[in-house]
Image: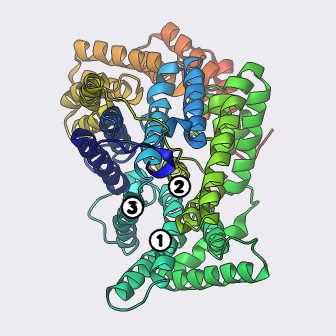
Amino acid sequence: MSEGGVHALPSVVPGVVAGNISEAILLLLLVLLPVAINPLGVLAIEPLKASLLRSGTALLAASWLVYRLTGASRVDVGANPVVRAALALTALAALSTAFSLDPRLSFFGSFDRGMGWLSLAAGVVVLVVVADLLVDDTRRERAVTALMVGAIIPCAYFLLQNFGIDPINWSARGAPGSSLGSPTFLGGYLVMVAPFAAYRVVVAARGNLAGWRSLMYAGWLALLLVICAVVLLTTIRAPLLGLVAGLIAFGVLVRGVRRPGRTELVAGLASLLVITALGVATAGSGGLRGFQRFLTIGGTLDSSSQRLTVWQDSLGALVADPPRLLVGFGDEMQPAIFEHREATMRRTPIELWDRAHNLFLDTWLMRGAVGVFALLAVLLFGFRAALTARTQGLLLGSAVAAALVGHLVEVDFAFHSVVTGVLFWLLLGLAASLAPRWSRGVTHRNLPLAGAALLAGALLVPVMSAPGIADAIYGAARRSNFAAGARLEEQAATWAPWVEELPRAAGLDWQQVATRLNDRLAAARAEQDLLTAAQIAPLMPVPQVRLTRLYLARGQFDQAEAACERAIANGPYRSAVWDACADVSAGQGRADEAAARKARADELRHPDDLP
């Protein structure tokens, strides 16, 4: 009899190889996902990361199924409460996707965020595989090392950006955010990594600090300090709060299994203060700006007051639609929801709010109350597994629990990206691996089904890579002339037919060709592409505004007015909509209506005039 009362399984070479391949794919994802960028693309970050995640997990799932189907695993992964709760959440999310306001977008996810049901499913695949493969201590430690290695390049690149050394021009993509594309996403990612760096520091310190062990201790401590400095330099408050919470939690948990008293709390706070002081010293004045931003909380135009407005509107949207209160509006539906919430639109008349900036509110909006309960169940079982492992003397349990604490504090004011989303499921998978359920019987081999799994995984790779391919083609289009660019954008749209931006860009380019060359064929293609964009995003006002402008320029006032009315229906509080409609009224000679619409646009442009 082997561990857990399991009969020893015969050595199965294909299964062992498949397990090693699965581990290699997992480690590559942990290293490559935070680093991957395509500066030649238009969005450059999330489409590529989403493609890597989805295609990588397709291969990961295929190789892991071979590992399972050849009888190489002794773990009853399906009996693990964390896994069961995660699978239930995935199924409930599929139900919400089926009843979504826009099921196709909810399934594939938006172009600029890369989330949706597919990314959720990819994250849960990571959880299931980790819960099975990483029951082995050596494999688990290799995964932690890969997680640490994956953080080195984003931190180094961000520091280079802050010193003004950056080979890539990110001016069109917002504030520098290293290879995560946003300082918020970078900070959120490092909040989850920091407790594992602290874990490695403690492990190294508990040994004999001589020779290579002293070098390891110095290396992990240096990485921890760099992580703290980078989080401070982002000047984003949510990651700062998450970092503080995560490190305090680790400092308390690592003290021992008994209930933490005053000594433990003081020790945790002292460690945090030392790390913070060193981080500020490393980050300089940029780190101090991060703390100074807390003094602006509550200001009229501060993001904190904007979040309160968005949170209130989120609850209002749910209460106003009881069936959606239960099952949600579907993934990626927040932009369409907030377009109809006046207070949110008046707070930010130009920006697009595509998230509620709170994990639980976003989950409620997307997947309803059933999704929130499922998420809470996953978290409950995950924390229980991590804390149980801690009481059994496994120090890694403290790091997993602390990382979850820091992450939950951070996403109370933010939201998941592709990278932070998959790391969230990795943390839960690690928690599950610390409390495995062992199989009571011999797993039966099924080689034909294993072969089918491999084939399915290989066939899914190009399909799952579609967002990254589309963005690469889109980038080539931006570097071409209008006619060639429009053709490339149409080609990109065939790779990602759920993305409205691609046919819209093609239509605008064909408009330029038609105007400059008086080309009727280009004019027809422009209209067709803009109509396609409006069909892809029937709930959003911008595609209708583009059609309004097109028909207005052609003097087709009836079509322009129809498009204008659809734009108002989709975005009644968007000033650009009323500006376009005012021009339509003026073109028809309806001066009073034009003035009224223009006045409405001016009213909506001022965020201070809240209802």
In the image, residue 35 sits, relative to residue 325, either above or below, namely: below
Please give the residue where the numbered disc 1 appears in the rendered image: 197
Give the farthest residue toward the front.
Answer: 1
Q: Position of residue 212 (x, y in %)?
A: 32, 86
Mark 2 vs mark 3, foreground winner is 2
**Residue at image coords 47%, 46%:** 131
Question: What's the distance in space between the residues labelled 2 and 3, CA to CA?
Answer: 33 Å
Around disc 1, counting alpha carbons within 10 Å, would you say few (fewer than 14), some (14 to 19), or many (20 or more)? many
- Residue at position x 74%, y 29% from top? 317
Q: Is residue 405 above or below residue 162?
A: above
Q: Quadrant of the C terminus?
A: top right
N-term mark: 1 or 2: 1
Amino acid type, label 3: Ser
Q: Which SS class for mark 3?
A: helix
Where is residue 498, by image quadrant?
A: top left
Earlier residue among tags 1 and 3: 3
At horizontal 64% and vertical 59% (from top left) the residue drawn is 387
Q: Secondary structure at mark 2?
A: helix
Give residue 178's mark: 3
Q: Position of residue 534 (x, y in %)?
A: 46, 18
Residue annotated with mark 2: 434
Q: Secondary structure at mark 1?
A: helix
Of the two numbered discs 1 and 2 in the rendering, the one whose residue sits closer to the viewer: 2
Residue type at mark 1 is Ala
Q: Residue furthest bottom?
A: 210
Structural crowding at the residue carrying mark 2, measured as other residues with C-alpha within 10 Å and reported as few (<14), some (14–19) or many (≥20): many
- Of residues 440 and 385, the one nearer the viewer is 440
Amino acid tagged 2:
Leu
Q: Which mark is residue 368?
A: none
Query: Would residue 297 be seen by someone viewing this image from the given angle?
Result: yes
